[in-house]
Amino acid sequence: MATTTILDTVSPRKPARLAIPQTVRGRYRTIKTVVAAILLTFYFVTPWIRWDRGPQLPDQAVLFDLPGRRLFLFGLEFWPQDLPIAVGVLILGAFGLFGATTLAGRVWCGFTCPQTVWTDLFFTIERLCERLFGKDTLLSNVAKAIVQVTLAIATAIGFAAYFNDALTFPHALVTGAAPMGAYIAVGVLTLTTWLFAAYAKERVCLHMCPWPRFQAALLDKDSLVVTYQRWRGEPRGKKKVPLRSTLTDLSALVREASSFDAGRGDCIDCQRCVNVCPTGIDIRDGLQMGCIGCGLCIDACDDVMARIGRPAGLIRFDVEGSDSAGSFQKPTVRFLRPKTLLYAILCLVALGSSVFGTLRMKSVLVDIDPQRGQPFVQLSDGSVRNDFSFRLAHRLPTLDRIAIHAEGLPGATLRFADAQTGHEAVHLAVPGNRRISDRLFITAAPRRGPSGRTNIRIVVTNAANGATLEEVETYFWGPAR
């Protein structure tokens, strides 16, 4: 006669993964919702914040001004020359991500990754449409498509608003006044947002994202990950099957599990943990690359344990392999260990470097380069002229006029292209966009010009108070004698 064990009460077949994960309530679901709401609000609201920088300058708090090659970030203005600061910020983000992964696994993936945030938002929309119009009905599918495409368009316009004036950009798009590049960008971003968040969804995390392949090198025995406490959950069985005695000793668990009348563990194989998982994995099979560490399975399992009168924590954030201890108490986790301290130090160094670089940014940038072609022009009166390209950009609160003079070339006169006569010191008004690009002519008096090449210094000062803004070393050519 065949012997029936407790394992026979559980079907070995795994149910098909749900197209839309079930909703769940709990601590991690609340954290995930709050974090997503903050990030989405920041994303959509930030371009609309205003910041007064004076006339002829954009009043958008955060703006990537691609034509002007500058980034406005509230009271700061960054130029291409400030790229090392951006490198420091990227290094800070990288080591911060490494440190967070070492401490708590894929906490970035589970709570703050844009793919996770938008996919979770699209899942919510799909669940709401099915609740209002029914599951797999024509009206529900149409409503899903309309809302998803609308949200994808809003996401694309929100992103493009960081590169255009947010107040006028939507109107320009509708009226056709926006540049062709804006329409292409919005179209591409709409397509990719819909493709990744509404169609690809968890496939991005499982097959496209490279980060899961790296995390194994960052985790260690003290890293917090989502774990299934096999010692108390196995063997699985339906709720009506008698519960085995609670054990804390692993050897006793092995002895009892070897008998046929041992009873079931706490896991009733309800599949709730699988049905709420955004990537559809079964955490009871152990830590997997598909686990994004969102903790939703913990909320689902804790809810089931409360319903059947068992302690919470069958699935919990713990160190990998914690089930070998066979205890309801979580082991002490060492947050201060060599790897985390190293990442903390590297983050502080990167942060300090970025802050130092920001504080040391030059407020005035002057470029003076000799024009290509013949090095000098000898005029009819015997004077010698050199042509230079003059470019100035500044990020000072106020700078109305500048004064320019040359040192190292006695008797030299200067003038810009639109002036008829030269002077030893020339004055120039600074436009509201805080940028000047012009041709500068420096002329040496007759019989006082140098023979060949000589080094000179061009000094740019604030005409209002005489403060030196910049000194540029260059050279002046004269006929060889």
Image (tube, helix red, strand yellow):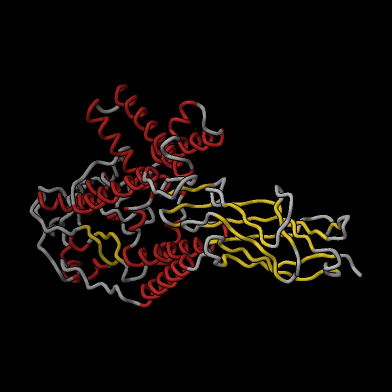
For residue 307, side relative to residue 178 (left or right): left
Figure check: 381 above or below 270: below
Q: Where in the figure is residue 400, as x and y percent of width and height?
A: 53, 54
- Residue at the extreme right of the image, as rendered: 481
Residue at 74% x, 53% y: name it.
421
Q: Quadrant of residue 246?
A: bottom left
Q: Residue at x 27, y 55 (%)?
A: 284
Judge whether residue 5 can be spotted in this image. Answer: no
Residue 441, image x, y percentages: 74, 56
Give the percent coordinates (x, y) of residue 128: 25, 33
Examine the image and state in which quarter residue 132 appears: top left
Left or right side of 173 for 220: left
Looking at this view, is 35 or 271 the one in front?
A: 35
Q: Residue 221's spot in the image, x, y percent?
A: 33, 71
Which of the two residues, 298 or 410, is positioned nearer the viewer here? 410
- Front residue of 78/440: it is 440
Horizontally, residue 343 falls left or right of residue 17, namely right
Residue name at image x 41 percent, y 53 percent: 74
Residue in the foreground of this view, choosing between 170 and 378: 378
